[in-house]
Image (cartoon, rainbow, N blue to C red):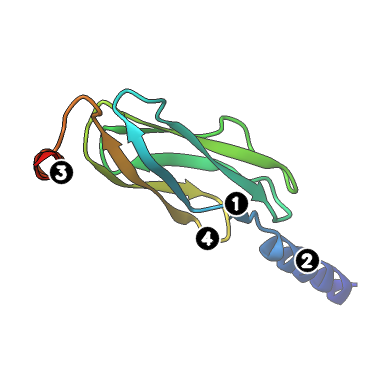
Amino acid sequence: MKQLITILFIGLISFGINAQAKIEFKSETIDYGTIEKGSNGVRVFEFTNTGDEPLIISKVSSTCGCTIPKKPKDPILPGQTGVIEVKYDTNRVNPIRKTITVLSNAETPTIALKIKGLVIDPSKVSVLDKKEKSVMQQ
C-alpha cells in the first residue's frame, strides 16, 4: 500500500512539473516604418498561450519613457490569445529602436520584444533635400 501511494505521489509531482504555460508571439518585432510626427503610435504584439497552464504576464517594461507598454490584466488560458499594447510618443522626431521586456510564468519567463521605425517631421526639410532641390533647379 505504501508503494502505491509513493508511486501516485511521484506521478502527481511529475505531472505538475510538466504542466507549463508557453507564450508564442505572432511577431517579436514591430516595424513602424516611416511615420510622421504626431501620428498614431499605438501598436499591438499578439500572442497565444500554447501551453497547458494559464499564462500570467506579471510585468511589461520599456527601455525608455517614450514607449508605454500595457499588459493584459487577466490570465490567458491555454489556447487563448492576448495582446500587449505599446504606445510610442511620435512627437519625438528620430529613429525608433526600443525594447519591451515581458516577464511571465511561461516556460521562457523573460522575452524581449522590439519596435523600430523612423519618425519624421514633414514641415522640416533636411539639408540634403535642400541641396538636391537647388542642384535640380540649376
Residues at marks 4 and 1 touching, judged by CB atoms closer than 8 Å: no
Q: Is residue 20 above or below residue 98?
A: below
Q: Amino acid at mark 4?
A: Thr
Of mark 4 and mark 2, the one earlier in the sequence is: 2
State the separation of the CA atoms marked 4 and 3. Answer: 56 Å
Residue 94, position as x, y percentages in the image = 22, 39
Q: What residue is disc 2 on?
A: 9
Q: Nearer the viewer, mark 4 or mark 3?
A: 3
Discs 4, 2 touching: Cβ within 8 Å? no
Earlier-in-chain disc, 4 versus 1 = 1
Real-space CA distance between mark 1 and mark 2, rounded to the nearest whole angstrom? 38 Å
| Quadrant housing residue 13 | bottom right
Q: Which residue is mark 1?
A: 26
131 left or right of 109? left
Q: Residue at x 74, y 54 (%)?
A: 52
Q: Name the disc covering residue 136, or none.
A: 3
The residue identified by callout 4 is 108
Q: Which badge, 1 or 2, is on the more N-terminal residue? A: 2
Query: Separation of disc 2 and disc 3 at Cα?
Result: 82 Å
Task: Between label 3 and label 1, give the one nearer the viewer.
Answer: 3
Q: Amino acid at mark 3?
A: Met
Q: Earlier in the sequence, mark 3 or mark 1?
A: 1
How far is disc 3 from disc 1 in space, using C-alphas? Answer: 45 Å
